[in-house]
Amino acid sequence: MLRSSDAPATDTSLDPQEFTDTRSAVTVTGAAEPLVVSHEEPSLAVNARDYLSLGVIEVNRMGDYEHYLVVVAWSTIDRGRIRGMSSQPVVPDHLLLRTDGRTFKLAAGSEPDPVRDRELYPTPAAASARRYFHVDAATLRSVVDAKVIQVRVDRGDDGTAVYTPWGTRGVEALQRFAARVED
């Protein structure tokens, strides 16, 4: 006999993803979806945007926790058709992350070993670039709790590109992840 429940169904598709690296026995937890931020490029085409997917991961080495902001760059712009431009998106070495008036200067680092064989945050575009930024738990919480988020990318002679949130599913996924983050 089937039982019916008065409790509302819970959408588990946004619950954090977790796996254990079989080589090192390290546990990796990540948000189910990234927060996507975009920068419009109206000078190149109508509705043309560059995107950054901001994923978060926690690497647990037997109680020693490390946190990373995973930044994946992708675009709706086919730059290969524009003379003098590369078709490959780029994630720069440095980003400025602004959350509710706080500014964090982030420097890219190396990919954590336990995630080398997994693509935690795939992109909807064929051409993409990925970088890992080592951050502390307080910075991750600032991203999750922020009412206003901006990512600023210095493009040299082309000025600064400002990315702002695009869509909302990533926000809830980050909130569920943050509920499990260890300091």
Image (spheres, rainbow, N blue to C red):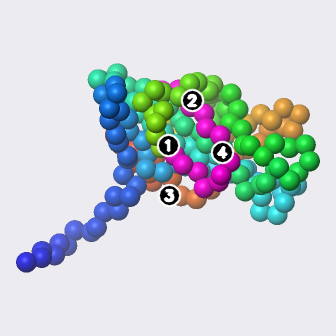
| Residue that carries the numbered disc 4 in the rendered image | 128
| Residue that carries the numbered disc 2 in the rendered image | 133
Q: From the viewer's perspective, is the residue at label 2 or at label 1 nearer?
A: 1
Q: From the viewer's perspective, is the residue at label 3 or at label 2 nearer?
A: 2
Q: Going from the N terminus, do you reach mark 1 or mark 4 first? A: 1
| Residue that carries the numbered disc 1 in the rendered image | 119
Q: From the viewer's perspective, is the residue at label 3 or at label 1 nearer?
A: 1
| Residue that carries the numbered disc 3 in the rendered image | 169
Q: Is residue 146 visible?
A: no
Magenta-highlighted residues:
121-136
Q: Going from the N terminus, do you reach mark 3 or mark 1 first? A: 1
Which residue occupies 84% across, 32% down?
156
Q: Position of residue 83 (x, y in %)?
A: 92, 47
Q: Quadrant of the C terminus?
A: top left
For the residues marked 3 and 4, what is the alpha-carbon distance in whole angstroms? 21 Å
Q: Going from the N terminus, do you reach mark 3 or mark 2 first? A: 2
